[in-house]
């Protein structure tokens, strides 16, 4: 029995989660596993009523679940940063979800914005450190609201935090068993403290993985090569900020936010899975948002829960639909409604 927490969240989040749960119900019957869910109403609407984001009691309860399925966080009537820090970051830190895992796979070359690139050229994974760096929230204002004001934001990197992320990336590269190449993405020529430490730890851990080819790329060069030569990459490991940036570019290379899913991973605890495109409030209630990113996140969740056959079936269904049915991956341009695409995934499972 899998015990799954559901956070539908804001905007189109509840719509895409509903389609994911539709697929979950169908695939559980086909592959004969049981699950139960509980909904947590964390999000903008509740915050506007109660000024609560996520409570300590809710975080403690979330630790008792096997996984968390998240729709989206972000409300147009709530100042940016409140929900993101108060729900997303707070949950990641409290549950020690120290890996952000972002597969970047192209399922239909017609949806790739890059010239002459095929499905074989865009197939890599970004392993992003998810609990330290600039997102730790450390810093201060000096002389605030004066002409001499200074804003200081600290990138906090520990050897233990870096090593567990890098070690996860090496293990993942070995298990993925494709090109067996791991690239460290950083900025060693400018961020000479943080990425000196990253590079030293990377080089030390690499000795234990002689079967993995390693290399290094500055983050600016990485963005260039995502566009020019995405086929060079297999697995990339990087810090919190750079990971946040390059995964959005990765989403565009694979066809758009409508297909981009991610996992916030605690390898020995509770992980959280989500579409990475945000709440898209302008599409709320119109039944036009693409639910495939949320459905792909569901597939990632099931793989983590050791339901590999069910996860593979969902991915195969999504690939078939993207290759043969959709006009676009963009909201309102797919040729089908949100709920119709959810139904199509279910039909493809059968």
Image (cartoon, rainbow, N blue to C red):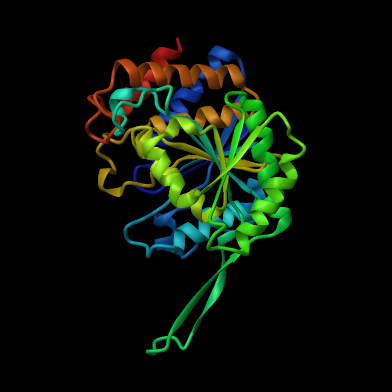
Picture coordinates of residue 73 (x, y %)? 43, 51
Locate residue 294 relative to residue 208 in the image: left or right. left
Picture coordinates of residue 51 (x, y %)? 46, 65
Is residue 116 shown above or below 294?
Answer: above
The quarter holding residue 47 reads bottom left
**Between residues 175 and 218, which one lies in front from this camera angle?**
218
Residue drawn at the location 59% of the way across and 63% of the way down? 192
The quarter holding residue 226 reads top left
Locate residue 76 relative to residue 68 in the image: left or right. left
Picture coordinates of residue 63 (x, y %)? 67, 46
**Between residues 301 and 323, which one lies in front from this camera angle?**
323
Residue drawn at the location 36% of the way across and 55% of the way down? 75
Residue drawn at the location 37% of the way across and 62% of the way down? 78
Residue drawn at the location 73% of the way across and 32% of the way down? 210
Q: Is residue 26 visible?
A: no
Q: Is residue 43 visible?
A: yes
Count of labels shown? 0
Is residue 162 shown above or below 171?
Answer: below
Locate residue 197 relative to residue 107 in the image: left or right. right
Is residue 327 shown above or below 134?
Answer: above
The quarter of the rendered structure image containing the N terminus is top right
Q: Residue furthest front?
A: 189
Locate residue 335 relative to residue 89 in the image: left or right. left
Picture coordinates of residue 76 (x, y %)? 32, 58
**Between residues 6 and 108, which one lies in front from this camera angle?**
108
Q: Residue furthest top?
A: 350
The quarter of the rendered structure image containing the C terminus is top left
**Between residues 129 and 233, which one lies in front from this camera angle?**
233
């Amino acid at each position: 029995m899998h015990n799954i927490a559901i956070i539908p969240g804001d905007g189109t989040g509840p719509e895409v989660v509903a389609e994911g749960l539709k697929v979950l119900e169908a695939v559980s019957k086909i592959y004969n596993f049981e699950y139960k869910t509980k909904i947590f109403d964390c999000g903008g609407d509740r915050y506007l009523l109660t000024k609560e984001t996520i409570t300590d009691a809710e975080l403690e309860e979330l630790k008792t679940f096997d996984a968390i399925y998240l729709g989206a966080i972000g409300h147009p009537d709530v100042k940016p940063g409140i929900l993101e820090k108060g729900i997303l970051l707070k949950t990641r830190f409290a549950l020690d979800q120290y890996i952000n895992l972002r597969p970047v796979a192209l399922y239909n070359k017609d949806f790739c914005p890059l010239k002459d690139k095929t499905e074989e050229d865009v197939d890599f994974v970004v392993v992003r450190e998810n609990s330290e760096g600039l997102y730790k929230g450390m810093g201060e204002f000096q002389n605030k609201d004066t002409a001499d004001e200074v804003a200081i934001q600290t990138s906090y990197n520990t050897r233990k935090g870096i090593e567990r992320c890098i070690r996860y990336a090496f293990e993942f590269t070995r298990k993925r068993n494709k090109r067996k190449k791991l690239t460290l993405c950083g900025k060693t020529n400018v961020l000479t403290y943080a990425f000196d430490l990253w590079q030293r730890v990377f080089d030390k851990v690499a000795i234990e993985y002689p079967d993995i080819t390693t290399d290094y790329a500055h983050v600016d060069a990485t963005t260039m090569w995502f566009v020019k030569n995405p086929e060079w990459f297999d697995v990339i490991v990087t810090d919190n900020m750079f990971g946040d940036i390059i995964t959005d570019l990765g989403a565009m290379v694979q066809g758009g936010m409508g297909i981009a899913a991610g996992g916030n991973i605690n390898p020995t605890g509770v992980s959280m899975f989500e579409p990475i495109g945000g709440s898209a409030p302008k599409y709320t209630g119109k039944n036009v948002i693409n639910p495939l990113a949320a459905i792909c996140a569901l597939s990632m969740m099931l793989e983590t829960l050791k339901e590999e056959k069910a996860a593979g079936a969902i991915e195969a269904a999504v690939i078939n639909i993207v290759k043969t049915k959709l006009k676009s991956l963009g909201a309102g341009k797919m040729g089908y409604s949100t709920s119709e695409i959810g139904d199509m995934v279910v039909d493809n499972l059968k």
